[in-house]
Amino acid sequence: MIPTATERRRKHWGWGYEDGQPSREELEAAARGIRERLGFGGESVEEPVPLHAIELPEPRVEPPASLSDLFRSDPYERISHALGKAYRDVVRGFRGQIEHPPDLVAHPSNESELEAVLGWCAEEEIAAIPYGGGTSVVGGVEPRVGDAYRGAVSIDLGALDRVLDVDSVSRAARIQGGATGPRLEDQLREHGLTLRHFPQSFEFSTLGGWIATRAGGHFATLYTHIDDLVESVRAITPRGTWESRRLPGSGAGPSPDRLLLGSEGTLGIITEAWVRVQERPRFKLSAGVAFDSFEAGAEAVRELAQSGLNPSNCRLLDATESEVTSAGPAGKAVLVLGFESVHHPVDEPMRVAVEAARDHGGQPGEIKSAGSNQSAGPEPRRGALRENPPVRGEAGSDPVGSWRHAFLAAPYLRDTFVACGVLSDTFETAITWERFADFDARVMETARTAIAEACGVSPDGPGSPRLSRRFTHVYPDGPAPYYTVLAPARRGGEVEQWDEIKAAVSEVVVDAGGTITHHHAVGRDHRPWYDRQRPDPFAESLRAAKQAVDPSGILNPGVLIDPV
């Protein structure tokens, strides 16, 4: 189903909708606030290159008449499907630098139409790029496929967005891969159920995209990835349908759905999945706990991760991150702690967790319940997301609420940062506890040096770049550290500036024993380091699997592996 002209359109270059773009006056007001808060950025304000001013090459291919109703090639469609949502993508879109637009955008409304599109792409040697919500931050949807293909088609799964079946006995639901987070939650709500998977991209990302990239979600412990919620997966490949059997567990060899998890559109296009759902939590408690140092907080988090308490939220922010998000007292690291349950009160596990934190020097704040309009984690309440949100007020007044607001607002704020000359991006990883301290020290030192060199500024003093970190997810055997960079942008050279920083930090992350990505996927941007991380025999096995299901090598070439 091709979108109609009356539908609300997303921005062609950044996060959110066209009608949510701030005015010039709003941008200038934001610039003043940013400069006051950070000490840099906001000296001047730029506006994005308008859609009509962007020049594109003519499409290299045309669909056959029998399929023409499924395709669009107008500038908006091609430009809006040309980039993901990484900082480097937003900057290029903002400046109208669309280097690799798809030649066509397909909008299949069912599996038969999808099969026809894939068949045509295979026959004509055209790259097929699966596109869910377009929220990739690693080059996963950019048609950067080289000259070995006659063209590139972006296949938008947005029309496959329904909850098809609900099994209330086993508590599972069959959902189409193109359903966004709000879309599937609205449909599950009618049955009194929820998937309870809330990545930061929740507003626009899709179930199929979560599965294809092994997305991290709401829970900071126990059920941290979409992997934990998948019961079976169905995908369309150039060689036929790939569907795993619905089972609560199985020991029958390597799991077919586990191979699709993280496959990033290289083995098939995910059209639907059975996922484990639950009733909506009735009992929720949240609290902020301040620590004198990030290191002390990390020891408390390790005890909590190994305790079996399994808090739904257990995110540790260092003092810099806490300051930027107004989550806690100045100079303090803050632990955002939460518990939730469908069936029983969570006062006792919260009490035990707070006492454990106190044993490590933690200073707990007020414990709040859902009755005070708080959430145990970053759940986007209906209508709570705001485009171009203002900066929060008094630091520490509500650590959980302030952090939650900043978490959900970050994608919108980044667009404003681009307009105001602030470089803003992140990198994340995972490492075992016994190596974390040395690992973190190496990463922080390397990142500070790389940022200072790329920005041409001192790493210390007023107006210096901000480098912060937090734990997004924690496990009994280690944390997932997530690092954020805020720095003065070099106008016109932001992409090269960030690429320089990204290369330096990626090198140290892999060399020090971490993973190149904990939940942001591989895409095209992480390929050099992913190739070093994975075992060579596994890489050969993956190439063989791709050759079996995609002999023409059309599915998302360049992601994970190169086609044979």
Image (cartoon, grey):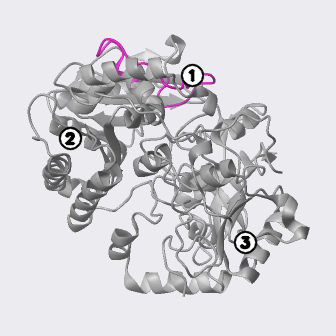
Structural crowding at the residue carrying mark 3, measured as other residues with C-alpha within 10 Å and reported as few (<14), some (14–19) or many (≥20): some
Q: Which mark is residue 384?
A: 1
Residue 491 occupies quadrant: top left
What residue span does the magenta drawing correspond to?
375-400
Which is the main secondary structure of the residues drawn in magenta? loop
Q: Residue at x 27, y 61 (%)?
A: 503
Residue 7, placed above or below residue 217: above
Q: Amino acid at mark 1?
A: Ala
Residue 509 highlighted magenta (yes or no): no
Structural crowding at the residue carrying mark 1, measured as other residues with C-alpha within 10 Å and reported as few (<14), some (14–19) or many (≥20): few
For the residue labelled by badge 3, is the local secondary structure a helix, a strand or a loop?
A: loop
Foreground residue among 96 and 455: 96
- Foreground mark, 1 or 3? 3
Q: Residue at x 77, y 51 (%)?
A: 160
Query: Which residue carries the number 3 mark?
Result: 61
Foreground residue among 337 and 350: 337
Residue 535 percent across, percent down from the top left = 37, 80
Residue 299 percent across, percent down from the top left = 20, 41
Q: Which mark is residue 557?
A: none
For the residue labelled by badge 1, is the local secondary structure a helix, a strand or a loop?
A: loop
**Res 356 visible:** no
Residue 185 percent across, percent down from the top left = 68, 36
For the residue labelled by badge 2, is the local secondary structure a helix, a strand or a loop?
A: helix
- Foreground mark, 2 or 3? 3
Residue 388 highlighted magenta (yes or no): yes
**Res 304 visible:** yes
Q: Which mark is residue 299?
A: 2
Per the model, the C-alpha gap separating discs 1 and 2 is 33 Å
Residue 391, placed above or below residue 234: above
Residue 395 occupies quadrant: top left
Residue 330, placed above or below residue 187: above
